[in-house]
Image (cartoon, rainbow, N blue to C red):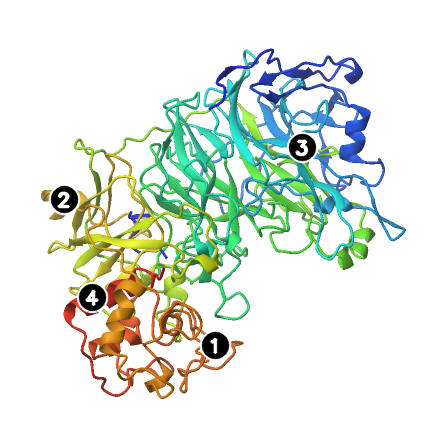
Amino acid sequence: MLVFNHRIISCVLLGMLQGASPITINADTNNQDAATRKMVASNISLEGSGEWLPEARQQLFGTEGSGTFRRPPDTRRLPETGDANDSGERYQKWEGIAGDSAKDERPQPSGEWDMEDGIVYTRIPRTTSAVEISGETFRNIDIYDRLPDVSARLQGFSGPGQLVHRKPDGELEILYDCVFPEPRACVPMDASVSLDGTRIAFSVYRGNKFEKRRPLFFPVTVPNTALSIKGGEAQIFIFDLSTGHLTAWPHTPGTWDTAPVWLPDGHIMFTSTRAGDWPSVLGTAEVQPTLQLWIAEVDGTEAVRVGPHERDSAMHPWLHSETGRVMYSSWQVANMLPYRTQAGLGVLFGTKDNFWWVMSVDQRGGSLEAEFGAHTLQTTVGHKLKALHFLGERANGDMCVTNYYRGNNLGAGSILCWPVEAGNVEGNGPTSSPSQKATFEPRGLYVAINGNDNDEPAGARGRVRDPEGLPDGNLLFSWLQGYCFSTTFRRFKSDVQELVQGCDAGIYRTTQIPVNPAVDELIMVVDSPNWHEFMPRLVHSRQVSIPPLKTADSGQCLLGAASMKAEVRNYGGEGQFPDRTPCALQGCSTHGIDLSEMVKIRFWEVIPFKHRMRTSDFNGSQGIRTRIVGDVPLKEDGSFLASLPCDMPYLMAGVDSEGRAIARDQVVQSLRPGEIHTCGGCHLHSTNQTPKFEESLAAQNPPVILDRLSVPEWEWARDVFPLLQKNCASCHSGDEAPDGLTLDRPGTGEESTYWQLADNINTHRLPEPPPVDIRGASPPGRMDRPWLSKYVHMLFARESLLYWKAAGQRLDGRTDEDRSNDINFGPDHPWTLNEAELKILADWIESGVYAE
């Protein structure tokens, strides 16, 4: 995938709440005597109590007895500190010593940790009631409770919820309460502890109601609630642990401000929809705008967007202690990226909500890099990558992430960890990788907690999520025990009813790394039969590196490379035609053309969508709109330096002397004001022994300055269709058109010229389909992306038959005799397009075959 990615190449009320005392529950205090306190922010009621009102309990939990709590016999319960509330919950102290993975050879912390730090976490009611259908009572309905995940980012998860601070001495604080004195449609989540350990930042997700769920093929709705999209929004709050004051950030109704993370300079990075951008069409017709990275003052003022390159969404950033970089989960579903798996038939896209990778930026939001997942799906550790989300860090600096199949599994699966390498080194490249699975996989990747991350019932291992490092080297995490899988009514009636437990999420800790929850010892921290507890964070201080940032005194946004040395060819060489692998994993390059033909770097500006987009609203191959900004010539040593518009989302490619792409990136990037982003070459992540930009010719010369709108955005009806009508329609028209290709039919619907070129992957109506045999595909001759039809490759004009015919020669570096099952140029073809018209045709193909 990422070719030139330079790893990658690159307001309502603010103030104190009146009477904002936290609700305190001591383990030795009777809940019935807990005093009711009121907290008010603007028009938001924050009433809370340490006791249950009978009506609220019945509404949330239903009748008791149908949700039996199970704990494996080899799970240790820690010493109890007394009753926490009348739900039977227990809170324990820590004990145990970490055991380190044999694969992890780096020095590890050791020793016993006795809970000198508190924890903060979210809890939501577990549905323990039963449901009656046609006179028959069914239990374990809690499998339809839903925790937040990549498919339920802003709504659709269960609630209401509480944000709970458990102090080291066993005392509890309810920092934010959507449950008492009556349930409200909100859930506080995303707890983030300040670096000095004194304050908690978190998000409160809201809807105007909770909706009942109706699972697949169920004849009735079930009592499980889900936060409605109607009235949806999220606001960030700061809780001061020393004073008990709760401060609300300024808020615009209808926007989501989520997932705050504290930065060393006192600012807070967070994700937000406030820019009003919408996801790419290939992402799906999303019902919420895009979450992007922002930075604000600690009180929420002076907010600045730093992630305009996030075209689909960014979630849950984490500040890495050793590198000082902000790691986060990024959704990447533009260009060829949704087609990186076979997904049944070879011509289909994969499960798009699973394409969340770990990316990172520096503390100003610049220097975008791919950390994990961008270039591989299979791994050497026996786990296929799915959605990589919910980050944490071990005490030794290893990053950890939850790997899970989206949607059906409550955001839980397995937890994978890896040592973070400095210097833009991601893992072994295709020339040095021992296997395709290991290509650009982080060196030292290991399975820390071996939960079930497949799309099936959880089984004995259960599912795990939310890693959080402990000082002794172990991990704190959320463990989901039981079936924990959204299934059909038929399996609910049979398989689920046979089980002791449906699904219960609680917080546990490891006693060694790696661990298999089905057989190895775990220590329970908190796991109530009436609550799902998740998203734990330690309340403690920590040290974070503050690396120096390269900045330009001029304030320009500079992007450069020392060479065109590259690792962009597929592991094992070129596959059988049509081969999607190079364009879906390691960038996208034309295998028949030598990379030495690249003489310029081309940049496209990515034009954001400002309203919800459906497939029917958009005609184009990449799911995004782009327009050419310009080209930057390479120096004799292959280096370049460009000055780009700051905060402009862009794509890039290496092009030949005619401006036609040879190798290209597929991940959108941007540069922050004053940023200098350089690399040694193209995709050289497997080694830090790369050419130094400071020693290149480009570094000794002024940058090439590119401004927006250097080239028009080429459109089908205005620019391209008239060329084909003028030059080609005299032959290619009517029922007897050569090869069945008619080039005089306007519009974009079926049978139009546009459809034949840009949307006929099934090769319908062709008298001679190409000799392609994709296993399982029907009809014979059906193409596969990146080919959109027999005539057009979505990313390269030099791979497109239409362009060959217009130019009068085959241009992909091969001859018709080289391969037996690819597209042939065929007999000589008359052509009349001039040089300027050929350029428009090539630019239109490589900019995404856009049509209004």
Q: Do the residues labelled 2 and 3 touch (CB within 8 Å)?
A: no
Lower sequence index among marks 4 and 1? 1
**CA distance separating discs 4 and 2:** 26 Å
**CA distance separating discs 2 and 3:** 54 Å
Classify residue 436 by image quadrant.
bottom left
**CA distance separating discs 2 and 1:** 47 Å
**Callout 1: helix, strand or loop?**
loop
Q: Closer to the observer: label 4 or label 3?
A: 4
**CA distance separating discs 1 and 3:** 49 Å
Q: Closer to the observer: label 4 or label 2?
A: 4
The amino acid pointed to by label 4 is: Lys
Q: Residue 774 carries which label?
A: 1
| Residue at numbered disc 2 | 703
Q: Which mark is residue 160?
A: 3
| Residue at numbered disc 4 | 839
Residue 228 on image: x %, y %: 62, 40
